[in-house]
């Protein structure tokens, strides 16, 4: 990876100040959009909120139950109809004032009807791992302790996303600096992309928001395992805890976990000594103690990893097995969604195996990976031009990154392995959702469906944000360099993110006018 002279212009202090500014900018952006959107988005926010309430009351779900009474007490008055309904469905062709701003017999009658409608919804997220909901439950209790009540408490739950996005930006910077400490474009570009990627899952209560932080921490641990020196015991402990946190946040993180574990096992399988350690051939008596010492160090670190990961993950698996009938709880959830598994012979008839079908899957997945899935007036909040750019630029820059790694131009062995793990992580996530697309008949489900049988919910692979950002920025830099404009890649990225942010504002501006949001308290 080429080292540009421009990086010398940035002192360590100035660079960290710049990254801090990006963290604050990301936090401010997420705060504004969290406040702009009313409750409850149709991306299962009511279900995730129900689990937060249950955990805050010390009631870990044991079955796929209906929404709890405590949750309905919040959902009924504060839910906005603007996500899935249209004004013409109401008297006078406009949305009524929020129920929490109304009073009297008429409002009570509307609340009763609304409550009856919400009371039939089953929470099929009940078997999800507990880390995010436990964290949110503590955060909710903290808000209540400082005097927040009513809708203020609801927005307080959402505002946990603000420190999480700032932490994600910082983790992205640390990952880029670890891979190439003298590559300015990567060090600044990765946190820049993470700070302004318009993924709207960060605007709601959803366990997907914790995945990129946990996976980012795990990715940093994996980078340490790639170093030639033997891993310390503390690294094994931290890696095991990061693995546990990643699993206990979202089951959709399993492909990313698999790549991380394979990379660590492959690293532990490498010879402990490199022939280049010594200036002259050492004797067997000299190398044997060093070899044993390094091997024992790796073994101790790996044993600590296994122990710290296996205990919490195993405990949760036993809980779900006992209460939900399986170690993941997914079998019953799939049945509730109306999905059925197709015979293996029918997998190959899926349209994803045609050029057009493959492009539909890729473009839908990457569009929702970039901008999310929130609807307004029952229509996705999106720009078709922006969606096309997300799909095409991602494919182009990822291919450029993979080509750059293949040519090995200016890359050390460590950098090549680190970028390869990032690439495998992202491709594993994409492959996982392709597999889900082809193996199920989605029945009467709306999304995915029989008519559109693509499991293309990009927010579910938000754990891959840091690996994706590394590849996207590196691929952009490689492509610019091949065109003789390598030094301009950071400027190009700044322009891209400015346009993406402008598109985000234009697309989501309708939410700011809602009477149901935080700005109209």
Image (cartoon, rainbow, N blue to C red):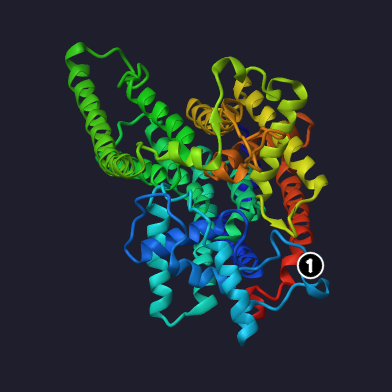
Q: Position of residue 378 (x, y in %)?
A: 73, 56
Q: Is residue 48 left or right of residue 328?
A: right
Using a 10 Å C-alpha cutoff, classify the residue at mark 1 as few (fewer than 14 neighbours), some (14 to 19) or many (20 or more).
some
In this view, the residue in front, 382 or 278, is: 382
| Residue at the bottom extreme, as displayed | 104
Q: Position of residue 433 (x, y in %)?
A: 58, 33
Residue at image coords 49%, 72%:
73
The answer to whether 271 appears left or right of 291 in the picture is right
Does residue 333 appear anywhere in the picture?
Answer: yes
Residue at position x 50%, y 68% from top? 72
The N terminus: image quadrant: top right
What is the count of numbered marks? 1
- Residue 482 vs residue 443, the one in the foreground: 443
In this rendering, is residue 443 above or below 121?
above
Q: Which image quadrant for residue 348? A: top right
In the picture, residue 34 is in which quadrant? bottom right
Q: Is residue 108 left or right of residue 297?
A: right
**Taking the image as drawn, is residue 18 in sight?**
no
Residue appearing at x 65%, y 30% in the figure: 401
Q: Position of residue 113 (x, y in %)?
A: 60, 70
Q: Secondary structure at mark 1?
A: helix
Label 1 sits on residue: 87
Picture coordinates of residue 170 (x, y %)?
A: 51, 54
The quarter of the picture where the C terminus appears is bottom right
Work out whether 33 lies above or below 462.
below
Viewer-side residue, 172 vs 279: 172
């Amino acid at each position: 990876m080429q080292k540009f002279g421009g990086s010398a212009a940035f002192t360590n202090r100035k660079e960290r100040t710049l990254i801090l500014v990006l963290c604050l900018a990301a936090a401010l952006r997420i705060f504004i959009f969290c406040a702009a959107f009313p409750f409850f988005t149709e991306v299962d926010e009511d279900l995730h909120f129900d689990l937060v309430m249950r955990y805050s009351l010390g009631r870990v779900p044991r079955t796929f139950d209906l929404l709890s009474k405590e949750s309905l007490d919040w959902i009924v008055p504060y839910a906005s109809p603007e996500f899935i309904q249209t004004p013409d469905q109401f008297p006078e062709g406009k949305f009524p004032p929020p129920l929490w701003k109304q009073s009297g017999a008429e409002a009570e009658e509307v609340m009763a009807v609304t409550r009856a409608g919400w009371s039939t919804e089953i929470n099929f997220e009940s078997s999800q791992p507990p880390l995010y909901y436990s964290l949110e439950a503590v955060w909710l209790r903290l808000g209540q302790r400082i005097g927040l009540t009513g809708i203020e408490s609801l927005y307080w739950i959402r505002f946990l996303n603000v420190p999480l996005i700032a932490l994600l930006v910082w983790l992205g910077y640390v990952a880029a600096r670890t891979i190439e400490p003298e590559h300015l474009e990567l060090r600044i570009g990765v946190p820049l992309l993470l700070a302004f990627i318009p993924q709207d899952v960060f605007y709601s209560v959803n366990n997907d928001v914790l995945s990129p932080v946990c996976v980012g921490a795990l990715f940093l641990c994996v980078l340490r395992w790639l170093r030639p020196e033997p891993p310390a015991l503390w690294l094994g402990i931290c890696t095991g805890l990061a693995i546990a946190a990643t699993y206990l946040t979202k089951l959709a993180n399993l492909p990313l976990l698999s790549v991380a574990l394979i990379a660590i096992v492959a690293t532990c399988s490498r010879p402990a000594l490199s022939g280049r350690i010594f200036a002259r051939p050492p004797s067997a008596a000299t190398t044997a103690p060093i070899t044993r010492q390094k091997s024992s160090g790796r073994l101790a670190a790996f044993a600590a990893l296994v122990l710290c990961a296996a205990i919490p993950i195993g405990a949760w698996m036993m809980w779900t097995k006992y209460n939900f009938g399986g170690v993941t709880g997914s079998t019953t959830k799939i049945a509730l969604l109306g999905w059925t598994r197709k015979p293996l012979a029918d997998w190959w008839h899926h349209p994803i195996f045609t050029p057009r079908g493959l492009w539909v899957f890729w473009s839908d997945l990457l569009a929702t990976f970039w901008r999310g899935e929130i609807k307004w007036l029952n229509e996705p909040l999106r720009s078709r031009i922006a969606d096309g750019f997300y799909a095409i630029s991602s494919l182009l820059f990822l291919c450029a990154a993979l080509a750059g790694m293949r040519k090995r131009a200016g890359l050390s062995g460590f950098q090549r392995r680190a970028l390869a793990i990032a690439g495998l992580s992202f491709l594993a996530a994409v492959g996982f959702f392709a597999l889900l697309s082809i193996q199920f008949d989605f029945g009467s489900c709306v999304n995915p469906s029989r008519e559109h049988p693509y499991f293309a919910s990009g927010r579910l692979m938000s754990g891959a944000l840091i690996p994706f950002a590394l590849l996207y920025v590196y691929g952009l830099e490689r492509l610019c360099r091949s065109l003789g404009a390598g030094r301009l890649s950071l400027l190009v990225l700044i322009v891209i993110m400015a346009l993406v942010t402008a598109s985000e504002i234009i697309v989501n501006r309708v939410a700011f006018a809602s009477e149901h949001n935080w700005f109209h308290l």
